[in-house]
Amino acid sequence: MQAYPFYRPRRSRRWKWSRELFAESKLCTNDLIQPFFLLDGKKKEVNIEKMPGIQRYSIDRLFYKLEEIEELKIPLVAIFPCLEDHLKTSNGEEALNEDGLVCSTIREIKKRFPGIGVMADVALDPYTNHGQDGLIDEAGNVINDETVRVLCKQAQIQAEAGADVIAPSDMMDGRILAIRKTLEDLNRTDTLIMSYAAKYASAFYGPFRDAVSSKLGKTASKKTYQMDPRNTDEALREATLDIFEGADMLLVKPGLPYLDIVYRLNAKLDMPIFSYQVSGEYAMLKTAVMQSMLDEKDAVLESLICFKRAGSSGIISYFSMQAAKWILNLEK
């Protein structure tokens, strides 16, 4: 490479047009996935205290947001239920209610907004009174194979309701293969699976549990099934297994603290890798903005482009709608 002064790297940064031309990573609205929290009932829009600017919606209020999603050209939404406590049980049986909040919402979205993709979460933590992602035994330990059987039924009713993407977030062993077989037996061959292949046992999930009203009881730690933050080789093993079991896409969660995992999976595996900018990341950025410590637009867009730079095909972010408005120059 020619040395200075014959090669001046600053030349390509001199003008806005040249910076755009030389950009190695670019962010567009097609890269974004917007999560929504659901409430039963009508005319409900409830602020989430630990996630300023984010609300829970009843289906009629959600329709207004989905109209914006169409206008912003965001291709996929992810839905999560916030249930009343009386619907939560030790075995999470409400997860298998074909007329429950999630399945009813999926049907209504696909009826009114057929062009928007819908991703449904497969896990039991919003439905259990102990807050675990699976069934527990008498000692409070999360049991794997029995949980997988329930998750297959949950995936089945979500797919039959019209979910385009099934997203198992539970981290049980073997659940991708079992769910894929279930979908194949139902002739749901077009239903995609986004596997939470590398979901770490993270402190950054706290606000999400508040958003879905999930209270963790005195049972086994989620560290017994979610991944150890100290490990990277384990993520590669988990992701490789999920590919062979039938996943169409892989997800890394949390986001920014785990960009090295995104980069490594992208480098090693010929599969689309997605990232989840989780509730704790959102809350930190939003709080800093509210305290005038950061410029919201600059900080958010920089954080999102970091995912693209690391190799993410797409990003689940609570900032997705706002980011799309900035990308499309609808807001300054």
Image (cartoon, rainbow, N blue to C red):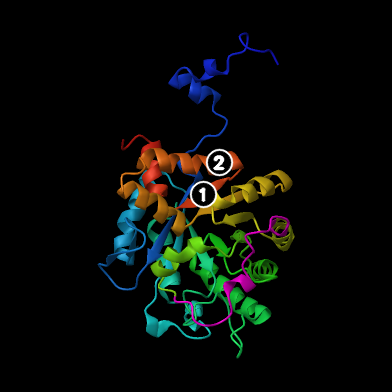
Give amino acid for label 2.
Answer: Lys
Residue 204, percent from left and from top: 49, 60
Label 2: few (<14), some (14–19) or many (≥20) C-alpha neighbours in 10 Å: many
Is 216 rendered above or below residue 314? below
Question: In the rendered view of the protein, which quadrant contains the N terminus?
Answer: top right
What residue sits 56% from the left and 63% below the top?
166
* Label 1 to label 2: alpha-carbon separation: 8 Å
Q: What element carries label 2?
A: helix
Q: Is 63 situated left or right of 156 in this image?
A: left
Q: According to the image, label 2 marks what residue?
A: 308
Camera-side residue of 20 and 76: 20
The reply to whether callout 1 and callout 2 are in contact (CB within 8 Å) is yes
Q: In which quarter of the image is residue 220?
A: bottom right
Is 106 rendered above or below residue 289? below
Give amino acid for label 1.
Answer: Ile
Q: According to the image, label 1 marks what residue?
A: 315
* Badge 1 or badge 2: first in the primary sequence: 2
Which residues, given as a range, are shown in magenta? 215-235
As drawn, the residue found furthest toward the top would be 6
Residue 57, percent from left and from top: 33, 64
Magenta span includes 224: yes
Residue 64, percent from left and from top: 30, 55
Camera-side residue of 28 and 102: 28
Residue 4 in view (yes/no): yes
